[in-house]
Image: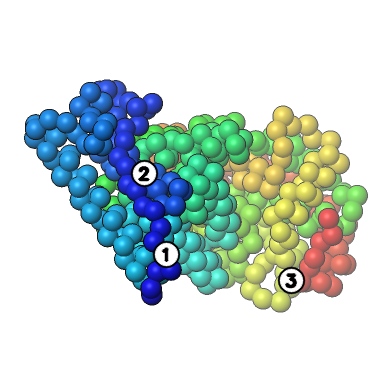
Amino acid sequence: MEQSKRSTFKLLFYLKKNEPKKNGAVAIMGRITIDGKPATFSTKLEIQPDNWDLKHGRVSGKSNVAINTNNKLDKVRVRIVKIYEEMMKDEGFATSQKVKLSFLGVGVMDDAVLKLFRKENQDFARMVAKGERSASTYAKYKKVYEHLAEFIKLRYHRDDMAFRELNGDFIREFDFFLRIDKECTHNTVWVYTMPVIALAKLGVKNRLIRDNPFEDYEINMEETDRTYLLKEAVEKLMLLKPSKQRYELVKDLFIFSCFTGLSYIDIKKLKWSNIQSFFDGHQWIISRRKKSDVASNVRLMEIPKRIIEKYRGVTRNDFIFPVPSNSTCNKHIEKLIKEAEIVTEQKVTFHTARHTFATMFLTEGVPLESLSKMMGHKNISTTQIYAKITSQKISKDMDLVAPKFAAMENAFEAMQNEKDVPEEIVMKGEELELAI
């Protein structure tokens, strides 16, 4: 394409003196100016400021450092001039931003950060559709992408950037952006920075960059107080007759989790094929955790067995329960906690039931090793020794603890004899839509 008119082009190298390194060295920056509009970039080079020739935009002297640095600056200049001239020849116009992005590789090579992130999310979405990955994890990755795109736009005034531009300052500034601009807690910052760090590692794996630019960035998950209900509160909730019929299902699911340790997503995916009679003559839930893909084998006690039987035939497929959305469950649990007059320091959510399972059974004497096996944990974070135990050991532990829940089971059985499954649940089955 013939260019319509020759634009004004200028390339200048200068020092970023306001951000010296610990050794006193400063970064050499580049500024491309076309038709009066500048675009700056880092050359990834640095020198001591006293060695800079301001007039010529080069390193002064004839030392090896000066010669090598000037040679690299010359190569940068040749590349940028070539990009500019080819852009003018092929497209008829050029902007400083386009030349800069072309030099950095954005839009020219497949090494743009957000571009690769989008592709990874698209691939993940396909796995979610096949049931191979969690929808909640996909939602988290989408949120991280949104925050990262907003950060790049706000901090760097562009829509994307090249992997070669990433450095330690990038991840630290993103951390600051999440804490201040997005008001994220420390642990949420940890959750949101991990995918970005993984993206940088993917860049190394795909040979888009040589080294991980975030290698020196450190952040750890902080221990938080996990909300759980005491055994007495669980019994109080279990015996509660909800004010509204639609709360009944959520109450049963919550109690079921309190006695199995299954998370919301694992209960939602629970099928009749997961319920098996085992070596000890008892029924067990044999499954793998959706989150970690770790085996989770739980022997069913009387209360969760009765809850399962209560919903037999309600769904039209192999799934045991007609589980509402997680948000609906949490809203109904909040109502149920108030109706049961249970006082807690922190908000109770569906996941509280899983923590309750752990604390109840630990309190009643179930060893940590058995609990870890039942909950499908990858390791035991509270102990340095990982004890690999057999299902026989779990069954023995459950034999010891089962009688301690006899009173609760009798009370639950008596209550169940008074009423059946709510009529609207039987009518709607798996297509149940609970009003909020």
Report the amino acid beneath label 1: Lys
Tags 1 and 3 touching, CB below 8 Å: no
Give me the residue at 36% from left, 71% from top.
90
Residue 99 in view of the camera: yes
Residue 105 in view of the camera: no
Q: Compare residues 15 and 115 and report the one nearer the observer.
A: 15
C-alpha separation, residue under disc 1 versus residue under disc 3: 68 Å
Report the amino acid beneath label 2: Arg
Please provide percent x and percent y for residue 120: 45, 62
Tags 2 and 1 touching, CB below 8 Å: no
Q: How is the image coloured?
A: rainbow
Q: Which residue is mark 2?
A: 31
Report the amino acid beneath label 3: Glu
C-alpha separation, residue under disc 2 versus residue under disc 3: 62 Å
Q: Which residue is mark 3?
A: 430
Q: Compare residues 219 and 119 and report the one nearer the observer.
A: 119
